[in-house]
Image (spheres, helix red, strand yellow):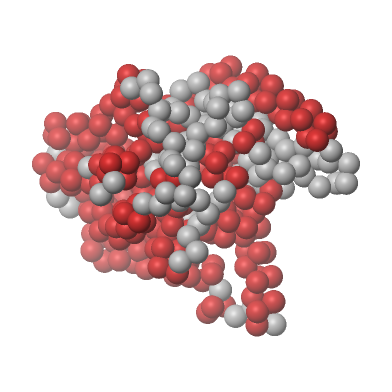
Amino acid sequence: MNRKVGAFALATLLPIPVLIAAGIWGGWVMAFACVYLSTLTFLLDELIVFAAEDSQPGVEFPAARWLSILLGMLHIPVLLFAAATISGAFGAGPIEQVAALFAFGLYFGQVSYSNAHELIHSARRLPFWLGTLVYSSTLYGHHVTAHRHIHHRYVGSDDDPNTARLGESFYGFAARAWTSSARLGLKVENRSQRARYGRIKPLRHMYAVYAGIGLTMMVGVTWAFGVAGLISFLLLSIYATAQILLADYVQHYGLKRASLPNGKLEPIGVEHSWNAPHPVSAALMLNAPRHSDHHAHPSKPFEALDLPEEDEAPMLPYSLPAMSTIALFPPFWRRAMDDRAAEWSRDGAVTAMAAE
């Protein structure tokens, strides 16, 4: 395996045996899992001052595609194990159950969801449906439609529910983003059905797929682990989903694309996404912090994403997971980000007008 892909494999696969050991033995192992997925990652990001190297143009890493598929296939078994652990099926006490929710939730939010994001952008059927399964299994299936057909088209504008506005708190954004993306995604799928079949066919509707997978998971965990398992699953799904909403909030906060004289939005540029150069969290999240390059080239595989120069694109003052934590505290978040966001949006608008 290529050394670069090996770094992604180590970062994304190692948490799984750590979490399984934590679920079985609890105690200090569970405490270590929490620290490993949070504090340790932050410290390593701050201590390792160099960023991962950019890819060479034209170089492909087939192993990266198989790593992504492997992570997708492991998602459901790990999710079921997490629900069992949090429900107390393995004898975890109340404190250990809360710690398990925190640790497993971090894994799904930072690793599994980041990988699902990679999968749904694939032109191949297996990766796409695997990514759909991951999102739908934690009750966020509509993100598959909304992310590809709405977010990527309208990012940086008021027409994108997943672009946070300047001064908007995460809590207001999360409620608006979840409901609006679900509603707009439904419109997209309804239009697709009418164009393809002349009418809406519920059994072939993508929203039926999303709902069916989610319902199957709910029934399955209830059958296997009782009401406690269902509650654990729902809490885990909410927590994991909150993290992807946090990532969307942080990565586009306050950045707007200018409206051109012809009424269209300026082309998406590197200045319309926040980036982070921190190598450890980038490996853990499959280069999700290299967000500008992803929006410029949505089909570009994660291992090939490049980091823009600091004077070309907005850079977060800390790593993406650290900034997601700060976003939970609006006064601190606004103090850290509002001036930065206003400056980049102003510069971007001037650049667009000059180009026109």
In this rendering, does residue 36 appear at all? Answer: yes
Q: Residue at x 81, y 47 (%)?
A: 264
- Left or right for 129, reference 336: left
Q: Quadrant of the C terminus?
A: top right
User: Would you identify the image quadrant in which residue 227 lies?
Assistant: bottom left
Residue 108: percent from the left, percent from the top? 35, 47
- Left or right for 162, reference 84: right
Q: Residue at x 55, y 41 (%)?
A: 293
Between 284 and 16, which is closer to the camera in this rendering? Answer: 284
Between 41 and 172, which is closer to the camera in this rendering? Answer: 41
Residue 48: percent from the left, percent from the top? 33, 22
User: Would you identify the image quadrant in which residue 28 lies?
Assistant: top left
Residue 64: percent from the left, percent from the top? 35, 52
Q: Residue at x 85, y 46 (%)?
A: 263
In this rendering, does residue 182 appear at all? Answer: no
Q: Residue at x 63, y 21 (%)?
A: 340
